[in-house]
């Protein structure tokens, strides 16, 4: 698939909505008015009584505008997200990076968090819409959704290029923050199109028209058109949209999550947990409070221990130092603990297990049925539920709903998952740095973001990503940073003995008594010896140093008396090992690859991890 963008009609700027129509706008802070300008190609209303840059215009008081919003065009360039800055030259675009890390920006080849590009170098395009607060919004639930969907389809069709086959226009909105993205498909060509300002307004009106008090409205809507004239609208009213860039996250954006619930309120049970958390709503939980039953029935003897364990082991959410009087035997000593437990559903005073232990009085039947229903095992009670139980007892507000903490793209990769939108270039460099560290490759062996003599280097040029080796040679050029990162990582792993080891380093495997110290090895690193690997041992089976089968004894740099003690072993399963290259020692030249096993040879033989192959004369 080939990707292209159309940038001829970028809609960036401020807009005002007046009498249901969208106009480019200029706001005056001096007198609180808004200048509305007719869109090119559209007929202006009759009462537009002034001009601006040769187009009909009208000045209205700020409060008469139904709403105002801004549009910003963002793009995907070189696998990274940028905002396209206003520029009169459509063929030379100034791109402002959306990140903030200056060190990473330099590695990406950016200058002052910016770069330049041509439209042909951009692979995706979308608009951010930021609504300003104080708008006069239509009453939610009013409007004809079918007519609005048809209007959206007409608007999208009016901007399509020749030969289109399929197009999708997606609107993602929470509160005052939205993203609008249009992509058309024609054969093997995918074209990103800028959205006209009317389109976002139609989508926003559709969200409002589809609102229902009992369920709210949707967060992501997609209109799909198939040539010549069929269309389908699909929406998601449950999940948070897969944003190009989520609102907030260190950027100055319009209000989102709190504003969403202010504009489109819904019952607490109908608020998705991600929205409840980000809007700061309290946790949603209803507790049942247990009391000492009036009809006190003894428990079956075989259940007493299980019920007692459950009642005592459930988390304590509130405790006081005083002891309470005995409700069963008021004349007795005041030995009842003043505390409360919860299992996330029930809250019960510590008196209930106390009376069960002391008098054999069981809890009320419904609590007892819950305990039996979950096999007398206390469930995990999250901290926010424990805090809510305490708040319930004290009569204070419940704690806020915790964020589920959706994993970032790098974490998803480490967990074996795939990020919804792939890795950005900056994230690729983060993963690369992490892998280099995990494999113990010294930072002195490479450079990222700059060219350096004598080491491996990955850096951005005007035309591509380049990787150069420590020896003078032709650089390897790649279109994408991920390809370059793979090449760099593979090269450093393929030639480990050519790279210095990190200093200092605590190794998990060390030489046993009688073996050369770690200082006798260079280029040390941890590896896994695979099952079926054969290794050569010089010496008895109390040590843990083995070598490659082709090693000559002088290369091992060992004491001469170990030369006759040769034995070959085969691994029956994989073993971790510390490997390195032996240094010269006296007349011994060194240069052999050695492997330090986790345990002595004899122990690995006993455990079945090694087997003898043959005795060498």
Image (cartoon, rainbow, N blue to C red):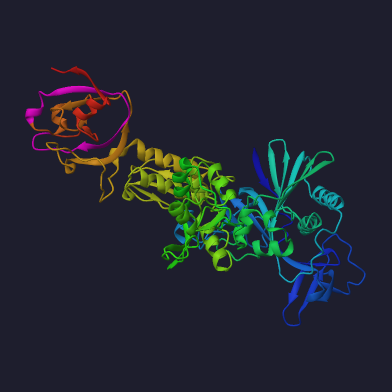
Answer with left or right where residue 351 lies relative to residue 510: right
Residue at the far left in the pictured view: 561
- Residue 87 horizontal/vertical position (percent): 65, 62
Expressed as whole percent of the image width and height from the top left, the position of residue 4 reads 67, 45
Instruction: Please say if 596 is above or below 289.
Output: above
Quadrant position of the C terminus in the picture: top left
The vertical placement of 393 against 206, above or below, is below
Let me know if residue 477 appears in the view. Answer: no
Q: Position of residue 534 (x, y in %)?
A: 26, 23
Picture residue at 56% right of the left edge, 60% below the top: 249
Q: Which residues are magenta?
A: 560-588
Q: Nearer the viewer, residue 188 or 330?
A: 330
Name the residue: 49% across, 44% down.
376
Looking at the image, which residue sits at the far right? 46
Q: Tell how many labels.
A: 0
Relative vertical location of residue 592 with respect to residue 167 in this rendering, above or below:
above
Q: Is residue 97 magenta?
A: no
Front residue of this view, candidates 348 and 450: 348
Q: Is residue 178 left or right of residue 252?
A: right
- Which quadrant holds the N terminus? top right
From this viewpoint, which residue is outermost toward the bottom? 30
């Amino acid at each position: 698939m080939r990707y292209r963008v159309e940038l001829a009609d970028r809609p960036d700027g401020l807009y005002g909505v007046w009498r249901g129509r969208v106009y480019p706008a200029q706001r005056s802070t001096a007198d609180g008015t808004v200048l509305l300008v007719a869109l090119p190609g559209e007929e202006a209303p009759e009462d537009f009584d002034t001009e601006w840059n040769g187009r009909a215009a009208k000045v209205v008081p700020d409060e008469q505008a139904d709403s105002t919003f801004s549009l910003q065009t963002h793009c995907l360039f070189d696998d990274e997200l940028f905002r396209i800055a206003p520029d009169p030259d459509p063929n030379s675009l100034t791109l402002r990076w959306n990140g903030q890390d200056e060190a990473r920006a330099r590695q990406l080849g950016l200058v002052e968090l910016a770069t330049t590009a041509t439209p042909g170098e951009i692979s995706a395009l979308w608009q951010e819409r930021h609504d300003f607060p104080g708008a006069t919004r239509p009453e939610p639930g009013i409007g004809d959704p079918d007519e609005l969907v048809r209007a959206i389809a007409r608007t999208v069709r009016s901007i399509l290029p020749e030969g289109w086959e399929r197009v999708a226009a997606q609107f993602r909105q929470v509160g005052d923050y939205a993203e609008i993205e249009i992509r058309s498909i024609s054969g093997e060509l995918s074209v990103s199109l800028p959205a006209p300002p009317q389109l976002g307004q139609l989508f926003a009106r559709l969200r409002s028209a589809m609102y229902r008090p009992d369920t709210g409205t949707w967060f992501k809507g997609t209109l799909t058109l198939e040539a010549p004239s069929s269309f389908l609208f699909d929406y998601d009213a449950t999940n948070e949209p897969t944003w190009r860039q989520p609102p907030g996250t260190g950027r100055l954006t319009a209000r989102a999550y709190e504003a969403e619930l202010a504009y489109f309120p819904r019952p607490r049970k109908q608020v998705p947990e991600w929205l409840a958390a980000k809007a700061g709503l309290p946790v949603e939980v209803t507790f049942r409070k247990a009391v000492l039953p009036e009809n006190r029935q003894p428990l079956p003897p075989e259940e007493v221990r299980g019920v007692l364990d459950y009642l005592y082991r459930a988390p304590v959410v509130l405790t006081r130092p005083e002891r309470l009087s005995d409700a069963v035997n008021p004349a007795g000593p005041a030995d009842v603990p003043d505390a409360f437990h919860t299992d996330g559903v029930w809250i019960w005073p510590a008196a209930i297990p106390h009376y069960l232990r002391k008098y054999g009085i069981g809890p009320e039947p419904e609590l007892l049925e819950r305990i039996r229903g979950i096999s007398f095992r206390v469930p995990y009670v999250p901290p926010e539920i424990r805090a809510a139980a305490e708040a319930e007892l004290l009569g204070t507000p419940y704690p806020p709903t915790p964020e589920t903490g959706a994993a970032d793209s790098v974490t998803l990769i480490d967990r074996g998952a795939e990020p919804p939108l792939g890795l950005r270039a900056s994230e690729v460099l983060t993963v690369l740095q992490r892998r280099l560290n995990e494999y113990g490759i010294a930072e002195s062996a490479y450079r990222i973001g700059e060219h350096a003599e004598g080491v491996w280097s990955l850096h951005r040029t005007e035309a591509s990503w380049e990787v150069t080796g420590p020896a003078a040679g032709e650089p390897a050029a790649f279109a994408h940073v991920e390809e370059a990162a793979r090449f760099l990582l593979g090269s450093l792993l393929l030639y480990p003995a050519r790279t210095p080891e990190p200093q200092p380093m605590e190794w998990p495997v060390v030489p046993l008594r009688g073996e050369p110290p770690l200082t006798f090895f260079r280029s040390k690193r941890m590896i896994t010896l695979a099952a079926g690997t054969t290794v050569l041992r010089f010496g008895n089976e109390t040590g843990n140093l083995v070598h490659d089968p082709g090693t000559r004894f002088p290369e091992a740099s060992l004491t001469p008396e170990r030369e006759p003690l040769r034995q070959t072993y085969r691994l029956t399963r994989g073993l971790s090992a510390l490997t390195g290259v032996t240094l010269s020692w006296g007349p011994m030249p060194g240069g052999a690859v050695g492997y330090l096993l986790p345990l002595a040879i004899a122990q690995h033989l006993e455990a079945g991890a090694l087997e003898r192959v043959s005795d060498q004369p």
